[in-house]
Amino acid sequence: MKILKLLISLLALSSLGACAAAERLTQIGQAPALSSIENPTAQEGYRPVVMPMPQPEVVSYQPNSLFRNGARGFFKDQRARRVGDILTVKITIADRAAISNETARSRKSVNSAGVGGVLGSIFNNVVPGLGGSSAIDVNSGVTDGGNGSVNRAENLETSVAAVVTQILPNGNLVIEGRQEVRVNFEVRDLLIAGIVRPEDINADNTIASSKIAEARIAYGGRGQITDVQQPRYGQQVLDAILPF
C-alpha cells in the first residue's frame, strides 16, 4: 500500500512537471508579458488584510484644549506601544565561530605467565610441544585518535517593519514582521518575530535585533534559482526511503 501511494505521488508530480515544462516551451524567444491593470479586490484568491488592532477609544475633548485622547501628534511618543502599531527592526548579524578539537589516546598491555613447566609435570609431557620452558604471553593494545573542526561565518544586515501582535502581562511586546521581494522569477523572504521591551525601542521607533528575546529570524528564497539548487523530487523521495 505504501509503495502504491508513493507511485501515485510520483505520477502526480510528473504530471505537474510536464504542465510547467509545456508552459515554459510556449514562452521561448518571447519577452515576459506584463499583466493588465485590474481591480485587485476582484482577483481570484483575494483576501482582505486582517491585522490585530487596539481596542477602540471613545474620542473626548476637553474644554479650552487642542488635544484629544488617541491623537497621534502634538509631542506624543510615537514609539510602538499598542497592538497593531508598527516599528522597524534593524537586523544585524555578524557571527563567526571557529572551533578545533583533537583527541589522541593510546594504551598498551603486556602479560606473561610461565606455566609450561607446571602443565608438563601434571601431564607427564603427554601434551606435544609443551615443555618446561613453555610460557603463555598475552599482548593487547588500544589506540584511538580523532579530530574535528567547525568554521562558520554568517553576515546579514537589513531592516524590516514589524507589527505588534500582542502585549504580555508584564508590558513586553510580541512583534512579527515579514517582507517579500520579487526580482524576475525569484522571491526573497525575510521573517522576524520575537519579544521586545518598550524601553529598548529607540526614539525613532527602531530596535536592534540583538535586543529581541526569543528572536526568530528567517531569510531565504523561492523561485527558479532556488529550485535549481534543490534536488529533484524523485531524488528527495529516494533519499527519504533508501536505508543506505
Image (cartoon, rainbow, N blue to C red):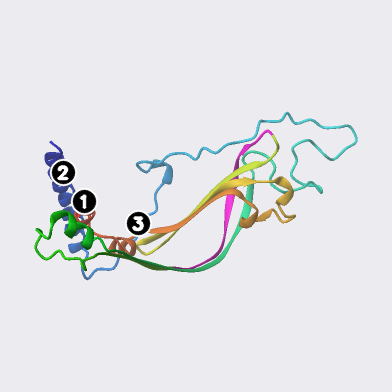
Q: Amino acid at mark 2?
A: Leu
Check residue 13 in the rendering and tell me which mark sits there, or answer none: none
- Distance of label 2 from label 1 (alpha carbons): 9 Å
Question: What residue is shown with label 2?
Answer: 6
Q: Quadrant of residue 21?
A: bottom left
Task: Please name the residue that numbered disc 1 is placed on.
Answer: 237
Instruction: Indicate the secondary structure of the residue bearing disc 2.
Output: helix
Mark 3 or mark 1, whichever is nearer to me: 1
Q: CB of mark 2 within 8 Å of CB of mark 1?
A: yes
Secondary structure category for the residue under label 1: helix
Magenta segment's dominant SS is strand
Residue type at mark 1: give it: Val
- Picture coordinates of residue 190, whole percent (x, y): 48, 56
Q: Which residues are magenta?
A: 149-169
Label 2 environment density (alpha carbons within 10 Å; few <14, some 14–19, many ≥20): few
Circles 2 and 3, Cβ within 8 Å, touching? The answer is no
